[in-house]
Structures are given as structure tokens and as C-alpha cells.
Image (cartoon, rainbow, N blue to C red):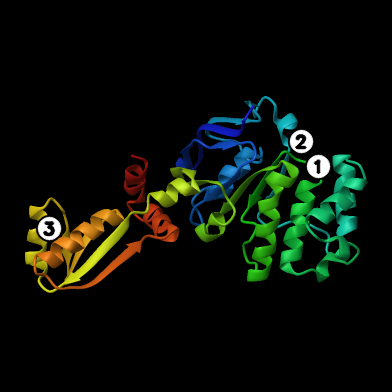
Amino acid sequence: MNEIIKTNNLTKKFKGKPVVDKINLSINKGEIYGFLGPNGAGKTTTIRMLLGLMEPTNGQIELFGEDAKANKIKALKKIGSLVESPSYYGHLTARENLEALRRILQVPKSRIDEVLSIVRLTKDADRAVKGYSLGMKQRLGIASALLGNPELLILDEPTNGLDPSGIHEIRDLIKKMPTEFGITILISSHLLSEIDQMASQVGIISNGKMIFQDSIENLRSKAKAEITVKVQDTKKAKALLLSKGILTDIVEDRLISQDMSDEKIAAMINLLVTGGHSVYRVEEKRKSLEDIFLDLTSEGGLKHANSLSS
């Protein structure tokens, strides 16, 4: 069994309006899956349905290869989660907070020291949590999620509100979990830069719809490079290139061409120079992942997403 999470047309409506619209998630064992989208896109609602905290309007959820509704308790025993802000008793220490949860989960007492070590809180385990930094509180929240020794960890915006140091700590912690502990991770975020540094797979949701689902590498490969060439006479240069089968557009005083190989660029420049054209500048601009994300989630992004998947 390789697929840990699978949804089929998962839908949630509020007052007749879909906030999650026919989502088909596919998350395999050992992946760090980045669930990405703007605030209000439907990420938390989807996560709440996966955790059984909210009933879907339509669609099916499979967890660990079994129907989630029919095997709810069995599935939830294999899942740890941190949704929005972690819950804790501020006047108690980290160890005491974990002990209260351990008694509910009925796991061995030794597990407390194990999770404290994983999240690097051993030295601060006996301090009152109210004195913790926000990053430390988030790590305690992850420790709580790990206490039951889960196979799947679901984290909803775990770096939200953290300073750069706290973000770095959480990122390093998440990245080591699949290889060191065999845990599959679903992590939601509205920041592609964060997901890019952690996830192997990404699903992008916008206005309740899944508009992209594939590897980070495949998303990056869709970013076509744009070659711009500044020449003395753009119209004559364009005509020369067109006569040799090289298509370009004119933008202001530059020739623009999309995604050319090094060999084609060299051939184009050689044609221009031997044709008597002065070439002043050649530049390559490649869209960043953030540019692609903004394109996908902006108005009309669904149309652009369809073009990416084609």
C-alpha cells in the first residue's frame, strides 16, 4: 500500500457555495506533500475533512488504503496533526503538557523523551510553556502530534507568524521526518518559497479547486525561459530571423523568443551578426516558482493551470 491519502471529488459547501470543489488529492508513503494556496483557498477545510473534524458534502476519502468514514478510529490512530495554533497549558512545562496527552493516547512514558528529542526541546522540557518563544511553542505542538507515533503527520501552516530563525527550525525538523522516522507529511502553506524548500510533491488549490498537482521539479520545468535581444533595427532583424524559420516578437526595442536551446540562441545571434545587425544585449529571464504560483492563483489562473498540465 503506497497511497496514504486519496480523495475522490471531495467537496464541501457552505450555504450552497462550494469552498472545496471536487478535490482529488493523491499522497504517497514517504512524501512531503506541500498543500499550497492563498489564504481562504480551502486548505484548512480540506484538512478538517481529512481529520474527520468536518463532514464532506460530497466525495470520498481513503486513508491508508481504506475508506475513512468506515474506518475512522483506526485511521486517526495513525495520524498526528497540528491545525492552526497548538493547544497547551501555559502554566505547565512541556513535559507536563505531553504527559497529560500521553495518558489520553495511552502510549509508553518513554515516548515523551523521544518526541522532545526529535523537536529539540529536551533542554527546555521542564520550563513553563508560557515562557516559550512562538517557534518553541510550534515545536511543542509538533511534539504533541508525534506523541502517538503516527505514520502520517498533517501540519496546517506550521510556520505562520514565525521569525526567520523559527521558520528555519521547523523546516529542518519537517525535512528529516520521512527519512529518519518514516513519516509521511502533508503540510499546508500560502508561501511557495517555504514549500519549495521542503516538499517533494505539491498540490495547488485556488478558490476551492485543485489547479495543479505534481512534483516540484515538474512545476519548475514548466517555467519557460524568455530570451530578449536588443538590436539596432528590430523590424528588419525580425524579418531576417523569420525568413530562417525563427519566430520572435517585438516588445519595445527588443526581440523576444521563448524557451530556446543554447544552440538555437547561438544560431540566432550568428544570423543577426552575419546579416549586418548590431546586437547590443542578449538576456535570459526565467519565471520563478513564485511567478508561476501567482499566475496560477490569479484571476484566470485555472485556464493557465490547464495549459501547464497539457
Image vertical order of residue 64 relative to residue 278, above or below: above
Residue 17 pos. (x, y %) = 45, 43
Q: Secondary structure at mark 2?
A: loop
Q: Secondary structure at mark 1?
A: loop
Residue 154 pos. (x, y %) = 66, 46
Drawn side of residue 149 relative to residue 68, left or right = right
Query: Quadrant where the N terminus lies?
Result: top right
Q: Could you give the CA–CA distance between mark 2 and mark 1, rounded to whole angstroms?
A: 7 Å
Q: Residues within 10 Å of mark 2 (few under 14, many from 20)?
A: some
Residue 233 pos. (x, y %) = 9, 71
Q: Amino acid at mark 1?
A: Gly
Cβ atoms under marks 2 and 1 closer than 8 Å: yes
Residue 126 occupies which quadrant of the picture?
A: bottom right
Mark 1 vs 3, N-terminal side: 1
Residue at image mark 3: 241
Residue at 30%, 56% in the rendered image? 262
Residue at 70%, 30% in the rendered image? 72
Residue at image mark 1: 148
Q: Amino acid at mark 3?
A: Leu
Residue nearer the viewer, 70 or 166: 166
Q: Is residue 87 visible?
A: no
Q: Which mark is residue 289?
A: none
Cβ atoms under marks 2 and 3 closer than 8 Å: no
Residue at image mark 2: 77
Residue 186 pos. (x, y %) = 62, 45
Mark 2 vs 3, N-terminal side: 2
